[in-house]
Image (cartoon, rainbow, N blue to C red):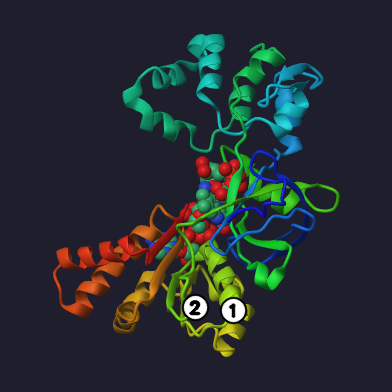
């Protein structure tokens, strides 16, 4: 259930929420910048369930907007069609409507038309569908501003530039709170995306919107994104196993708040992983307190960079193989959240290995066991 029937707000009509808390979770020595954010839903009528995500419409960095305007020699006052079909000043459209970081196909095509031989490399990559991967790797870390600055003599009208820009999409964040614990608020755990490429400091649009550009007087347009596939078991006595390294811990914080509020006695087991215990143990105090209070039955942590060899959550699962299998046999639901590229696949492989090892069955039978978990909605993923 994403919205109270009384609520006017949805993806089409996001609620202008107040960003009330922005607290850094990762310590000063960390290589990461992961933050705890709180958003007030007061007056919105929005309700969410644990497992849901919050959708957010960010705005772009105004400094980058200015730089682009200078590069195309525009004042920003020129009227263009925004992504909503409404005429507005170019500056506004670049700030709110368009993707101004990643170059679109349309922008590359216009660049090739204007710059000719000077961008023969881009022309060759964009005109040959078999070179898609090469194009991706050419564009990795390259933004619109780099291409504009590399070809300063090209003339762009405001209108043609705006026509090349794609619509800025909302970002999703796993909700890290239960309304039973926080009421008309929503908590998020966001890894701020900042990196260097081609000699420039880059910023992820939405994560730096939260980290740097919201706060008092700046509304954050939000909506609730329902995740029916990622729900706690209805039976409060059912055990749950949660694997959530990095920001993947977010929904499990909400699950634990919910389980604490509802009681019911179901056992809860969390696998958390990050780089270093001293600086990256997100929500350490809360998790240890939940463990002490008996809400978190078992907590296994894997700090990957505290020793020469990598230790990941799946290694901790392997160490606890027999008990993990016993929980599954007792009807536990198994959850994964976080990185979908590598972590979720490796955790899935370890789950198969545990089933095979502990039951003494073949790889095929282990696969059938895991498939049956999925079919009965006891194996749930929310990965990105
Ligand atoms: C269901 C769901 C739940 C999610 N939950 C969370 C959550 O709880 N917490 C969280 O932090 N995120 C979460 N995400 C991810 C989140 O939605 C955003 O994708 C993330 O915050 C990045 O968005 P951004 O706008 O800051 O960065 P963008 O502006 O989208 O930039 C990110 C892009 O920058 C590029 N990039 C990144 N690093 C480099 C590099 N080193 N070199 C070159 N290019 C690079 C990549 O192309 C990358 O895709 C979730 C995603 C989904 C789908
Ligand atoms: N789309 C985006 O722009 C965007 C933005 C933010 C985050 N993300 C992605 O979201 C995911 C979560 O990021 P995060 O910063 O919260 O944490 P993360 O990068 O997933 O790191 C958390 C922990 O997982 C470890 N890890 C790395 N590979 C692993 C594997 N194969 N199996 C198990 N653990 C592994 C890391 O170790 P090491 O680092 O020591 O290897 C670290 O200790 C990542 O995929 C990240 O790339 C994407």
Depth check: give the residue in front, 96 or 365. 365
> Looking at the image, is mark 1 or mark 2 earlier in the sequence?
2
Q: Residue furthest right?
A: 217
Q: Determine whether label 1 and label 2 are within 8 Å by CB.
A: yes
Determine whether the beta carbon of the residue marked 2 sits less than 8 angstroms from the nearest atom of ligand 1.
no
Any part of residue 301 in sight: no
Depth check: give the residue in front, 15 or 36. 15
Left or right of 130 in this view: 297: right
Above-or-below relation of 117 to 254 = above
Q: Which residue is mark 2?
A: 236
How many numbered circles are shown?
2
User: Which residue is at 65% across, 38% downward?
Assistant: 12
Above-or-below relation of 149 to 374 = above
User: Which residue is at 53% across, 19% downward?
Assistant: 106
**Can you give x and y, in whole percent of width and height, for residue 160 in the image?**
64, 14
Q: CA distance from mark 1 to mark 2?
A: 8 Å
Check residue 227 in the rendering and tell me which mark sits there, or answer none. none
Q: Residue furthest left?
A: 362
Depth check: give the residue in front, 86 or 4. 4
Left or right of 179 in this view: 133: left
């Amino acid at each position: 259930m994403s919205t109270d029937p009384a609520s006017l707000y949805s993806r089409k009509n996001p609620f202008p929420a107040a960003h009330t808390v922005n607290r850094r979770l990762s310590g000063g020595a960390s290589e990461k910048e992961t933050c705890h954010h709180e958003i007030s839903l007061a007056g919105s009528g929005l309700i969410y369930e644990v497992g849901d995500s919050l959708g957010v419409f960010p705005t772009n960095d105004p400094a980058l907007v200015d730089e682009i305007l200078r590069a195309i020699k525009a004042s920003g006052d020129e009227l263009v069609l925004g992504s909503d079909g409404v005429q507005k000043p170019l500056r506004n459209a670049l700030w709110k409507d368009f993707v101004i970081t990643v170059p679109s196909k349309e922008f590359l095509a216009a660049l090739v038309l204007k710059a000719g031989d000077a961008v023969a490399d881009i022309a060759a990559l964009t005109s040959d569908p078999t070179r898609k991967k090469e194009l991706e790797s050419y564009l990795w870390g390259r933004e619109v501003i780099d291409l504009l600055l590399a070809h300063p003599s090209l003339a762009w009208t405001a209108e043609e530039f705006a026509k090349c820009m794609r619509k800025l999409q909302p970002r999703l964040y796993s909700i890290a709170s239960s309304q039973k614990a926080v009421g008309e608020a929503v908590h998020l755990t966001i890894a701020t995306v900042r990196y260097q490429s081609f000699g420039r400091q880059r910023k992820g649009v939405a994560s730096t919107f939260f980290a740097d550009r919201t706060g008092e007087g700046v509304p954050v347009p939000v909506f609730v994104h329902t995740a029916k596939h990622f729900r706690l078991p209805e039976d409060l006595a059912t055990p749950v196993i949660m694997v959530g390294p990095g920001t993947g811990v977010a929904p499990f914080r909400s699950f634990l708040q919910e389980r604490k509020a509802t009681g019911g006695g179901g056992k809860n087991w969390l696998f958390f992983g990050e780089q270093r215990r001293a600086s990256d143990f997100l929500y350490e105090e809360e998790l240890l307190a939940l463990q002490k209070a008996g809400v978190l039955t078992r907590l296994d942590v894997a700090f990957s960079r505290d020793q020469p060899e990598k230790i990941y959550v799946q290694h901790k699962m392997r160490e606890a193989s027999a008990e993990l299998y016993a929980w599954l046999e007792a009807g536990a639901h198994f959850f994964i959240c976080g990185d979908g590229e590598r972590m979720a696949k490796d955790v899935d492989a370890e789950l198969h290995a545990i089933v095979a090892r502990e039951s003494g069955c073949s790889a095929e039978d282990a696969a059938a066991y895991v498939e049956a978990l999925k079919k009965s909605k006891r194996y749930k993923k929310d990965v990105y």
